[in-house]
Image: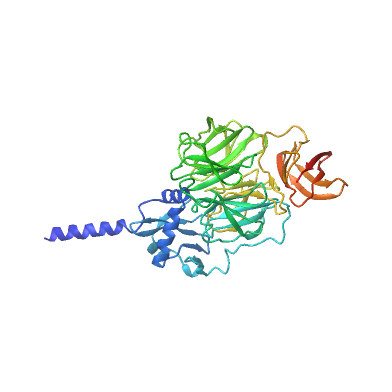
Amino acid sequence: MKLKTLSLVALLLISAIGFTAPIEDFNTVYTRAELNPAVQKQAEQLASTLGHPLRIYTEDFKFIEAKGVENGQVVYTVIVDRYNIYNGAYTAFHSDIVSSFDLSKSRIDYGNGNVVDNTGGLFNPVVSSQSRSSFWLLIPEWTNDKVYAFDSQTGDLIDPDFIPSTPGTLNSPRHAFESPWGTIMVADQISDAVQEFDTSGVFIRTYAPTGGPNPSIIDNIRGVFFRPDNKLLVTVGSGANQNTIQLFDTGGVPMGAFIPVGTLNSPFYIIQRNSEYLIGNSSGTNDVQKYDLSGTFLSTFISSSSLAFPQQMIKLQGGIIAICGFSSPSGLVFFDSVGTYLNTFNAITGNRGVYKLGNGNYLATNGTGVHEIDDTTGALIRTIASASNFQFIDLYNPSGLTGIGNEFNSAPGEYKLYDNYPNPFNPVTNIRFSIPKNGFVSLKIYDALGREISSLVNEFRQAGEYTINFNASKLVSGVYFYTLKSESFHATKKMMLVK
């Protein structure tokens, strides 16, 4: 009897010990929530029901978030190094969090606007006094389901509520970008839709799928891409169309699978490079794959041990591709034009979004903030905003004249101003130009009398090729001229607006 009693006690002790910490480790829980944020939302709902915090930010910059559920308990991920998030990170239950951290010196978010801030506003966003560039950067943020705006030249924060929290519409915004007609699109993973907002951040409609969310068409959206013909490509991570790229017409009407099931493995981001698309896979060994412009598979572009879970990709001068490596080995990873590994900047890990600022440095996002890193050494320069779950970065022109930049093909050999297309146009046309070296660029519109109508570009630009979308909806029909100036180069071309 004594032996049986001791065995029972031992069993109970072992069982109790087994539940003092989650079985699943940080990488497993963190990656699962990244692939499907609905998992994180479920954890947050359970935390709210139990009266536990959804997230905690400590005075010494520890980031604690409800990310999963195990055995009926909320699993928190604990990031102890906000720059290298995989350094020492772990998972814990609520009891361990309460006993390990001083909540009297933390910012505690219980959800539904119930926030107790004992840090003296340490995590409040700091807005720059003014923007130094005519272009802004839009960065969605999961924690509060809204979109921030930053300066594309300096990286300074302009507006932390450019698109404010919109309950029922934004539930996990991943990608915010400007439409060809000047509105703002936001790809939202949980609402399974691309939502459209006006330039003041007011919701207009569900753009795709037209008529409202339809998980049987798109479920668990990640990156999206407007083609030159203004049709929309959308990555799909779950549901009936899992592992496909879906195509939508200019009205948001579904046109079926642009890339069907077969070659993709949890697609996350799309860029166009000359006559091909590069698509990143968050799972499997084929990190980035190449497709032609009709959606036909060409080849695997990158399959590298130096890259895991690629997220946003950008094209740089000389054909170099910079890719955000989310999982370890993590960082900003560089490859040459044929997919050969070059190097990794890993001062920031858990990378999601990247943009090359006008000042030459990189803006990088991860699960703790928005950071500026040196373009030569990869060293951290500063953290601009501290909060959880910043996502992709995309360019926006607040003047209403849309621009596409920060993506370079091979460095052009000469200055060139191309014919606008379409021409004649009504009311939107594309103006393309190339500059062979870094410098100040001016692109302006004039009427037939030589009066300046609009300044589309008036700032420092990196060498490369750019397309600027000009919306003339407020102008009358007639002949207009567009002039490009950079260094000693000067060129003017004519275009016709017909309404």
* Vertical side of 128 occupied by 359: above or below: above
Quadrant location of residue 45?
bottom left
**Residue 403 picture location, percent across and down:** 69, 46
Residue at the extreme right: 449
Quadrant location of residue 323?
top right
Nearer the observer, 457 or 345: 457
**Residue 364 picture location, percent across and down:** 60, 49
> So how many labels did they put on this image?
0
Nearer the observer, 139 or 381: 139
Q: Residue at image x 72%, y 49%?
A: 401
Colouring used for the render? rainbow
* Vertical side of 125 occupied by 355: above or below: above
- The image quadrant where one finds the N terminus is bottom left
**Residue 393 picture location, percent across and down:** 61, 49
Residue at the extreme top: 298
For residue 98, side relative to residue 147 (left or right)? left
Nearer the observer, 376 or 447: 447
**Residue 290 picture location, percent across and down:** 55, 33
Q: Is residue 76 visible?
A: no
Residue at the extreme front: 499
Q: Is residue 159 visible?
A: yes
